[in-house]
Image (cartoon, helix red, strand yellow):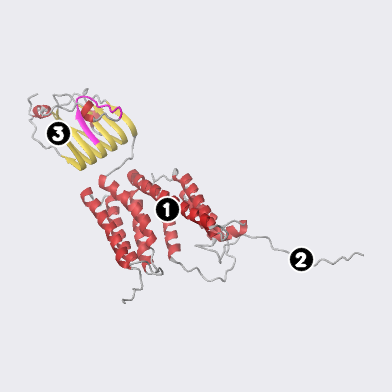
Amino acid sequence: MTDTQPTMPQPEQPPRRLTRSTTDRMIGGVAGGLGRHLNIDPLAIRITFVILTFAGGLGLIAYLLCVLFVPVDDPSAPPLKWGLARTVGAGLLVVAALAILIPDWFWGPLVPLLVVAGAVVYLLVRMLREDGGTHAGHVAARIAIGIVLVALAVGGFVAAAAGTALGGGIVVAGLVIACGVGLVGGAFRGGARWLIVPAVVLALPLAAVAATDLDVRGTWGDRTFRPATVAELAGGYEMGVGSLKVDMRDVQLPAGRTDLPLEIGMGEIQVLVQDDVCVTTDADVGVGAVNTGEGDQGGIDVDVSDDRDIAPGVRHLHVIADVGIGHVMIGDRFFDWDGPGRWRDDRFDALEAGTSRAACQGAA
Amino acid sequence: MTPRPGYDPASLIAGIILIALGGLLLLDQADVLELRSEFVLPAVLAAVGGILLACGLAGPPRGRP
């Protein structure tokens, strides 16, 4: 005898619809809703959104579209209370979006590093959240998180320095101010001292680059210029990083002063001149040295100004050098650095002391 | 025993210092000011020192023994 029980008619399930979560939300509930819909941890989706925000603003745009077009699961839910973490997180995303809008601010190379760092932090946080883990496992996870955070701090330090030197100093300064505002706001909500660390990590390289006026935008590498006419000197020469050499021996300078503006962010400037040319130098070096026939000066904020009297009718070359980090050399032979142990005094022939001075008096 | 204030003074002071420092560096980067290293580097050291001093004098954050 078979006993067949009648099956109860199941109520028809509504189609599974994507909605924004009102119970698991940091800002708009998009990650919570997507995580529920796709059965994925919302933390992974939040990290993905942040990473994609740095990839051309894609994450931010996608998030805003979801907020606009995806309905919430419970329209009667109370509005979100904005805490400190949400405020800081949203502020950082806004700053990131603004940074993306600024030309020349290139985030591309950072994206793979952010992906790796985000994935590692996510996995480690998941390990710590699991109750079943061993004590040794938790300790190892904390150590690993510490190492990742130190690596991120070092990376942030380097990125802030590079970003500032590449022209993004305003953004970095804005991030420091944003951290300061977060600290002031957080002071009345239980404190937010953790913001001190990223602020200092950003402020130190920013200050160092600001102090040296380092600007590495422009050409990188070794360039040698051999102008043939005075007209070619009008705009001067400019490079970002490397070696900028100007061979002036083929130029027939006219009587009177001829300016030669030179600028490099990081590296060396070498100018070759004939012995019978009067050379004066105005040099501004953030960190480094100036080596001319009138002697050497080196250190931080080296400011060389040569305003001697020049005899009328003398062929006078006035070098105006601006160097962030590096050195300026005026000589009658190029210096080729060919490895450790070779310092400029070994190979570089500076103008002989007094040669240029005599030329400036019309004695050469 | 002096009751602790209803806010975290270390966060407040550190925030004000960082806003001032960030503002100074922002003006430099925007070419409004021309800061030189003999001013910037001591200013940064003073800022870091001020933050450390504030954190030390304020004690641990609220909620921690």
Q: Are marks 1 and 3 on the same chain?
A: yes
Q: Quadrant of residue A344?
A: top left
Q: Disc 1 marks which residue?
A: A96
Q: Specify the amino acid type for callout 1.
A: Ala
Whichever of callouts 2 and 3 sits on the residue coming sooner in the sequence is 2
Residue A157 is one of the magenta-drawn residues: no
Q: Quadrant of residue A309?
A: top left
Please name which of the two marks, 1 or 3, marks the residue nearer to the observer: 3
For marks 2 and 3, give the CA distance: 95 Å
Q: Specify the amino acid type for callout 3.
A: Gly
Magenta residues, start to end:
A327-339
| Picture coordinates of residue A170, whole percent (x, y) | 33, 51
- Dot 1: chain letter: A
Q: Are marks 2 and 3 on the same chain?
A: yes
> Mainly helix, strand or loop, the magenta region?
loop
Q: Disc 3 marks which residue?
A: A295
CA neighbours of label 2 inside 10 A, class few (<14), some (14 to 19), many (20+): few
- Dot 3: chain letter: A
Determine whether the residue tagged by mark 1 lies in a helix, strand or loop: helix
| Picture coordinates of residue B26, whole percent (x, y) | 30, 53
Whichever of callouts 1 and 3 sits on the residue coming sooner in the sequence is 1
CA neighbours of label 3 inside 10 A, class few (<14), some (14 to 19), many (20+): few
Q: Disc 2 marks which residue?
A: A10
